[in-house]
Amino acid sequence: MLAIRGGKVVGPAGSFDADVFVEGERIAAVGVDLPITVEREIDAAGCYVLPGCIDPHTHMDMPFGDTHTCDDFTSGSIAAAFGGTTCHVDFCMQQPGDTPKQSLERWFQKLEDGPPLIDVGFHLAVTDLSDPSSLAELRDLPGQGVTSFKLFMAYRGSFMVEDDVMFQTMEVAAEHGALTMVHAENGHVIDVLVKRALAEGKTGTEYHGATRPPVTESEATARAIAIAGLAGAPLYVVHVSCHEALKAVEDGLAAGARVRAETCTHYFVTEEADLARPDFEGGKYIFTPPPRDPAEHEALWEGVGRGSLCVVSSDHAPFRWADQKSLGRDDFSAIPNGAPGIEERLLAVHQLGVVEGRITLERMVELLAAEPARLFGLYPRKGVIAPGSDADLVVFDPEAERVLGVDNLHSKVDYTLFEGFGVKGLPRDVLVRGTEVISDGRLVGKPGHGRFVERGPTSLAA
Ligand SMILES: [Zn+2]
């Protein structure tokens, strides 16, 4: 038995000073002055004890064009753990010619090749249902613990699906307690705008934003909500970047749609002008939807305040600036899309949200742990500090300070969107199922400790 003594235990309903007792992989008890004999203690006085954060949106070792994200499941999960994340749900991308089952086999192989430090679940990104066995295989996935399907409405010619594939996938999700997730941007319109810009010689990074205007996001968001409604399926809109798309979500909610939405850490701090940074610095900000007007930062926080944004994910999709982003030096459309952020997420949300007074500590835990756990079928096994739950725990020192920079982060990527960003509050010790993987800010866990987690139905299931 292990005791984490004297910390402030944070849960959605409130925070209280208590000891947390861990037996094996699970939390055995939470309380004050409990007569329990322990072999070992961690002193958490002056610290918060948080449920391990769950990042429901990551892309490890993901193929994109001729390259792939530079973190495998080992390096990405080490960065995650340093940032207080103990479980992530990654996207298994259906590849051309593969059925859903074959795609998952490839991703399970990635877990063998790059054994994770923290627990991992998979969403399946459906890109093609033309093989006759695909729909039947899709129906089997929830029974195997893959209870969410992702659909890309953008990236024409690669990941994008048409509305027929989206509708059929949503129908399967509705029948089987799965959650459909959409990347909501109008890929058809964006394709025209991008090709026109390139034809006019507008090849620089600054044109990435102008070719994906907010209406392409809000139109697709509203369309996805409408089609999900027709299919009777619950819907999760990933990476909402602007008030126009947020309004589409809120209109859906007002009309009774079963829809939830996330934003990502980087939308609180980046802006369209970053794309025009000289000497190809703008390439670091090529992700989709693109960075928007700076007024959107507070608009998104207001969405968090209203509850229409209920999760903050990282959308960790790291491509090295030096030799991967640079593939598109002469053509912004050839730059791999994505940015790192799995380690920065808790640190930045704590700083911007809690330290700067926009949200409470309890709300932060909702956004980063409890609500992702519920929506993605992990609650109450994860996402809460309670007897019987996995002992995924973060001892968080609210007084520790750091200026974030690529030199003190752990992804294999060569930049951070948070370079020079000062934070007060850092994870000190991190436990994954009762095993310390980070102790006093140092890596002590072994890759391979993390396991694939079979997830249950989403909390949004009918
Ligand atoms: Zn993503």
Image (cartoon, rainbow, N blue to C red):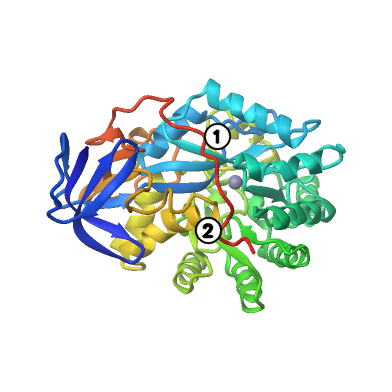
Compared to residue 82, the image places residue 194 above or below, namely below
Type of amino acid under label 2: Thr
Q: Quadrant of the C terminus?
A: bottom right
Expressed as whole percent of the image width and height from the top left, the position of residue 148 reads: 63, 49
Residue count near mark 1 (Cα–Cα under 10 Å), binned few <14, some 14–19, many ≥20: many
Looking at the rendered structure, the secondary structure element under dot 2 is strand
Residue 227 in view here: yes
Between discs 1 and 2, the one toward the N terminus: 1
Compared to residue 368, the image places residue 246 above or below, namely below
Question: Can you tell which quarter of the image residue 159 is in?
Answer: top right
Expressed as whole percent of the image width and height from the top left, the position of residue 5 reads: 16, 47
| Residue highlighted by disc 2 | 263
Determine the residue positioned at 59% across, 35% down.
325
Along the horizontal axis of the image, is 381 left or right of 170? left
Q: Quadrant of the N terminus?
A: top left
Along the horizontal axis of the image, is 144 left or right of 345? right
Residue 128 in view here: no
